[in-house]
Amino acid sequence: MKRFYLRQLLPLMMLVGLLSACSPRPEQQLAEINLPTTTTQVLLVTTPDWEATEATLQRMEKRAEAWHPVGEAIPVRVGRNGLGWGAGLHTNPSAGVQKQEGDGKAPAGVFRLGTAFGYDAAPQGLQMPYRTATERDYFVDAVDSADYNQWRSVNADQPNTPKQYWASFERMRRDDHQYEYGMVVEHNTQPVTPGRGSAIFLHVWLDPQTPTSGCTGMDRAHLLEVLRWLQPNANPLLVQVPAAELGRLSL
């Protein structure tokens, strides 16, 4: 009986192995996206599907005209409602859910990485531009404001009353640890389109079980490892999509 089942299973096992061998690897799919030639570092974040809130981040480095993974995959959390197509460097498909302000989705696509930030001075070893967040720093998410999706500060000679300037905003120096370290993701920045989503960051997650409101969160130690790895002259990008969409991305 065991031999019979083995004979039945063997062809199926061979087929699964053949299909796995034929499936394009992420580094092959990255090579087909036609990323800028100046980009040699990528943060590749993939989810199982559009609704998933759990994802993995794999650092990718281009050497000798080929992409290679760097280190182990890092567990991350994305938006509480999964992903939606964002506004970045990619050609945004007209079909599919489009990210909107307040939808609880993290943006899918290809995005430049902006300024790193945190509550204290720049961590040792960081090479990317860095900004220390103060009690007067805010990221504006009021759709009707000319400052929408921009980091703004209240002048030191003015009362620190942000509601006087914006109906809605994100405090860059929070009462919790989530922005202890972070990095701005350049979603919906060139140009800024009101209502397409704002204040998208890489940041420290609340905890391993809790998704974000639309950012990409991870453990503090992992985030510091990622931030220290990034180099300005590598023109690093965030590529964030459901795994099945990676091979369909285009710029």
Image (tube, helix red, strand yellow):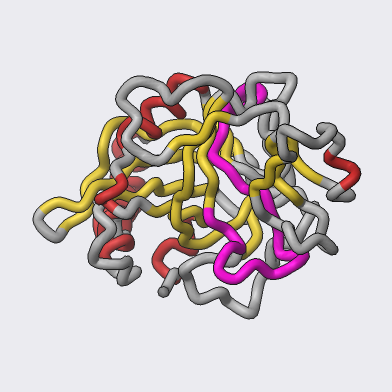
Q: Position of residue 215 (x, y in %)?
A: 62, 43
Q: Quadrant of the N terminus?
A: top left
Which residue occupies the extreme front position in the image?
157
Q: Is residue 133 above or below residue 248?
A: above
Left or right relative to 223: residue 170 = right
Left or right relative to 191: residue 26 = left
Magenta span of residues: 186-208
Q: Is residue 163 above or below residue 160?
A: below
Q: Main secondary structure of the magenta part?
A: loop
Left or right relative to 212: residue 2 = left
| Residue 162 visible here | yes
Tell me the residue at 29%/69% (across/down): 32
Tell me the residue at 64%/20% (across/down): 177
Is residue 199 covered in magenta? yes
Residue closest to the eye, 240 or 229? 229
Q: Is residue 97 above or below residue 159?
A: below
Tell me the residue at 29%/42% (across/down): 231
Residue closest to the eye, 115 or 35? 115
Residue closest to the eye, 241 or 206? 206
Left or right relative to 220: residue 35 = left
Tell me the residue at 62%/48% (across/down): 200
Q: Position of residue 82 (x, y in %)?
A: 67, 49
Q: Position of residue 251 (x, y in %)?
A: 41, 74
Is residue 207 covered in magenta? yes
Q: Position of residue 105 (x, y in %)?
A: 70, 51
